Image (cartoon, helix red, strand yellow):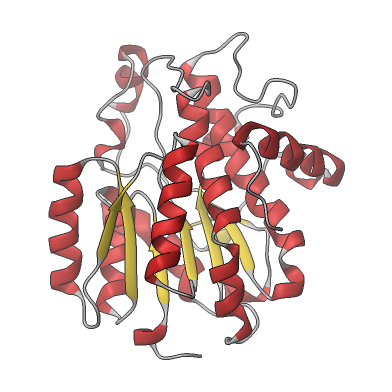
């Protein structure tokens, strides 16, 4: 395994919550961390905190909104200019919508931020991931998608209308995006097996973070009653999937508390996954290099 100082982790949604905690712990272990966030003030605070914890290079933060595909393309270009290799890509950014919103690019904002942005970013960073994989043991290079148990709450993803533009609700939008995260990891597992690159998704649990800051009132009434675990506990499975030996021995899994969790049944439908991939490519406007 290359030394930590030569390994690079890209962590999206690292300005707060489990993304910031994971980035901080990786930096403390000597990893070079390239992190993303949307809010300028939170990014600045997180960059200072992560860099202060680093035992190797200081963290680099890049502001980007993953619901905007133009921003994703810019982000990928800036990351590529910073490093020729990526050993860990943690697709962690995401959120639950308080309202229906269309982006300037004509995409439903929540599905775009939860799935389409990470989907496109992963595709655009494959050259760096493959470069790292060529110089590393099989299974050392990994893609980790932060999903949710809400991926299990709907029977399927409507491939004719993945953004739920007909019959949209905040709950359906979030469940659809989180199911897409699990499907994305499973699809990547097959596509990247020959490269020795691993892909997994996981449910972090209910975490005490800013995730709950912008919710519709009815959703907040429910989430306010829930126990919320400390951020470090929520980041534990993400870090385990990124670093431990066991997750490197398989790919395409869905995990919770360091153990396998039964995914939505549609995740085992290979024909469904192939069409899901194609529909995702159509929505992001290309950019796939798998």
- Where residue 228 sits, quadrant-wise, is top left
Location of residue 125 with respect to 33 vertically, above or below: above
In the displayed structure, does residue 152 sit left or right of residue 239? right
**Farthest top residue?**
167
Is residue 140 visible in this depiction of the protein?
no
Q: Which residue is at the front of the view, 32 or 146?
A: 32
Location of residue 189 with respect to 84 vertically, above or below: above
In the displayed structure, does residue 198 sit left or right of residue 266? left
Q: Which residue is at the front of the view, 107 or 168?
A: 107
Is residue 50 visible in this depiction of the protein?
yes
In the displayed structure, does residue 268 sit left or right of residue 213? right
Q: Where residue 11 appears, x then y in whole percent?
A: 38, 59
Quarter that holds the C terminus: bottom right
Q: Residue at x 25, y 38 (%)?
A: 210
Q: Which residue is at the front of the view, 150 or 17?
A: 17
- Where residue 158 sits, quadrant-wise, is top right
Q: Where residue 269 appears, x then y in whole percent?
A: 83, 43
Q: Where residue 140 appears, x then y in whole percent?
A: 56, 79
In the displayed structure, does residue 84 sit left or right of residue 38? right
Location of residue 29 with respect to 144 vertically, above or below: below
Q: Residue at x 24, y 29 (%)?
A: 213
Location of residue 145 with respect to 99 vertically, above or below: below
- Where residue 274 sits, quadrant-wise, is top right
Q: Where residue 94 appears, x then y in whole percent?
A: 42, 39
Q: Residue at x 33, y 52 (%)?
A: 36
Q: Residue at x 50, y 77 (%)?
A: 244
The number of discs equals 0
């Amino acid at each position: 395994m290359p030394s930590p100082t030569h390994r690079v982790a890209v962590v999206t949604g690292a300005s707060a919550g489990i993304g910031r905690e994971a980035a901080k712990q990786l930096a403390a272990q000597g990893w070079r961390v390239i992190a993303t966030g949307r809010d300028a003030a939170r990014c600045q605070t997180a960059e200072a905190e992560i860099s202060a914890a680093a035992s190797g290079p200081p963290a680099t933060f890049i502001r980007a909104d993953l619901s905007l595909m133009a921003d994703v393309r810019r982000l990928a270009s800036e990351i590529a200019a910073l490093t020729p290799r990526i050993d860990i890509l943690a697709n962690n950014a995401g959120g639950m919508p308080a309202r229906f919103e269309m982006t300037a690019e004509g995409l439903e904002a929540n599905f775009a931020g939860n799935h389409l942005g990470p989907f496109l970013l992963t595709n655009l960073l494959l050259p760096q991931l493959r470069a790292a994989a060529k110089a590393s043991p099989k299974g050392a290079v990994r893609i980790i998608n932060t999903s949710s148990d809400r991926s299990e709450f709907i029977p399927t993803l409507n491939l004719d209308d993945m953004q739920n533009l007909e019959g949209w609700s905040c709950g359906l939008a979030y469940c659809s995006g989180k199911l897409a995260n699990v499907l994305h990891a499973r699809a990547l597992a097959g596509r990247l097996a020959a490269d020795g690159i691993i892909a997994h998704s996981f449910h972090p649990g209910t975490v005490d973070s800013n995730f709950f800051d912008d919710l519709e009132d009815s959703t907040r009434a429910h989430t306010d009653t829930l126990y919320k675990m400390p951020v470090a506990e929520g980041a534990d499975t993400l870090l385990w999937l990124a670093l431990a030996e066991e997750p490197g021995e398989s790919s395409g899994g869905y995990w919770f508390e360091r153990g396998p969790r039964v995914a939505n049944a549609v995740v085992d439908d290979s024909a469904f996954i192939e069409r899901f991939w194609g529909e995702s490519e159509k929505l992001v406007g290309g950019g796939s290099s798998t």
